[in-house]
Image (cartoon, coloured by chain):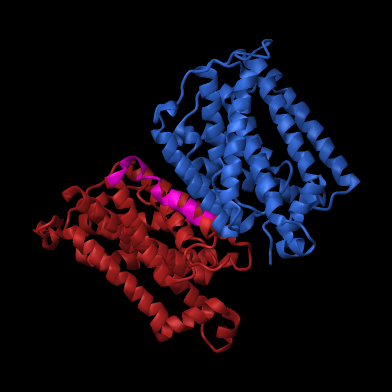
Chain colours: A blue, B red
Amino acid sequence: MTTLTDNTLPVTPRAMRDEMIVFVVMALLLAAVPFTGVYPFFVMQALCFALLACAFNLLVGYGGLLSFGHAMFLGTAGYCSAHALKVWALPPELGILVGIAAAFVLSIVTGYISIRRQGIYFSMITLALSQLLYFIYLQAPFTHGEDGIQGIPQGHLFGIFDLSKPTVLYYVVLVGFLAGFLLIFRIINSPFGEVLKAIRENEPRAISLGYRTDQYKFLAFVLSGTLAGFAGALKVFVAQNASLTDVHWSMSGEVVLMTLVGGLGTIFGPVVGAFVIIAMQQYLAGFGQWVTVIQGSIFVICVLTFRRGVIGEIAHYFRRSL
Amino acid sequence: MQALYAQLLVGLINGSFYALLSLGLAVIFGMLNIINFAHGALYMMGAFVAYFLLNIGGINYWWALLLAPIIVGIFGMILERTMLQWLTGLDHLYGLLLTFGIALIVQGVFQNYFGSSGLPYAIPDQLRGGMNLGFMFLPVYRGWVVVFSLIVCLATWFLIEKTQLGAYLRAATENPTLVRAFGINVPRMITLTYGLGVGLAALAGVLSAPINQVRPLMGADLIIVVFAVVVIGGMGSIMGSIITGFALGVIEGLTKYFYPEASNTVVFVLMVLVLLVKPTGLTGRAA
């Protein structure tokens, strides 16, 4: 059977070294952004989506589980953080924690339900669950329905960092992104990550070796959902609102697209994919619904001719792990 | 009581669409091993083709009922020949991603030209008006949709389960290589199967045009509910898809009467309950 990705090479000291070098280069480039005159809001937004895509990739690229409902974690964490910041007037650090905790609880519940089926059914179940949440948020009073939660105060992180200053906010978001990215990187290269890859390649064999694969998949789901929630909580500070678009199925589709473009099962692919897709939306904003058509075309082209994605192709060409 | 019967009727109509769509999904999945995410977009195309036929060609509803499924079915077969067939042997998830992309393209193009508002499609003269059944007032068109959908569903079941062609189809689902060795053109059968499934979706679109108006996104949310229906019913049996589709429509209608706030979510909640109690779905085999 052909598996979803053939991108990963075995973990060797050389592969780890390559990946660390690329990571340092990426961190330095991102840290230099405020000095280059690039619009920081755009990069912050892209970083939030990059973290979301990396969390999604942990599940699909390494666990082989294609979730079509990852927007539910983004949106739930966003709504809960926004509510905590605005209505309960909590400081930013606690607001983020509330969002992460909400996504953690949600991922335990939805993971318990959806992990019962595999493959194509898993995708349909996660999509249906996120649609269920969409309708709940549409009707729940605290989300303010179509209006969403607007004008969220940014406040001072730990009482020191003034998040209403764009540069300060940028570095806070960057540190949050890098921390989340390193955690995912660590998970992928841990023994746990190796077992996940084994399950993706051949689940019956992993079971016969004595692994309780359901527990591994469940844990991967919870980790992925919680980290996606972290991205949602960070996004609240950038966008200063929480709305229904973040829970909509089209958002889940965009996350899939970002990861697919960058490269399923590659470490840096989702980051590249997120920047590509967000930049595309930014520049094509004036074209109305043609953006949807272009996104659909990218899906088709990627699936038919470009299944490794940008980073996957580069890694394959140089025979490196990226 | 009038309101209860009215909601039951709405439930039966939605159930007809669920049944026609999940039936098509099941047929396609059996042959192609693909979950057709474009099913909702093709359902929408069926409604639009009927609209174009009437407003540009002056072709009435009855011909549209025949022509729209054929036109959309041919479009589907072109999709299968040019794109889907290249996914043979790859992970099932790529089929989902590819058809999701196709759905985005189709819906995006229609949204560009027709916005998000609905276009009216008149009920044909022969089906206007209503009947007083004593306990309720039945609009003729709505009754027609339920009866006609049921007939089409049963005909499809008969075609697949009871005819020679259906026997080839089921054999090719089990073991395509062996069936090819008997001299049957399996790739052509796969193309026709996709056309059949897509045609059923388009037919549902034509039926729904006079009731729900013709909108570019009319299939986008519907397909997610149909996915939940498919998870509940399982894709193992044709009759199972039909019964689950109608049953869930009725349950949704009842919810609209007794607890309207939950009418959008009841199918998804039922899906969760079924997964907790019987993870393989009501009629499905382990997958």
Q: Is residue A45 visible?
A: no
Q: Is residue B159 magenta?
A: no
Q: Residue placed at 44% from the left, 48% from the top?
A: B269
Residue numbers of the magenta segment: B258-276
The image shows residue B97 at horizontal and vertical percentages of 55, 54
Eyeballing the image, is B64 above or below A261? Answer: below
- Our reading of the magenta stretch's main secondary structure is helix
- The answer to whether A263 appears left or right of A281 in the picture is right
Q: Position of residue A234 (x, y in %)?
A: 61, 26
* A212 vs B13, nearest the viewer: A212
Q: Nearer the viewer, residue B10 or A214?
A: A214
Q: Is residue A213 above or below residue B69?
A: above
Residue lying furthest bottom:
B182
Q: Residue furthest right?
A: A13
Question: For this rendering, which residue is in front, A304 or B166?
Answer: B166
* Residue B109 spot, x, y in % from top left: 40, 48
Along the horizontal axis of the image, is B277 left or right of A33?
left
* Residue at image point 53% right, 79% down: B172
Residue at 22 percent of width and 67 percent of height? B63
Q: Compared to A132, does B102 lie above or below?
A: below
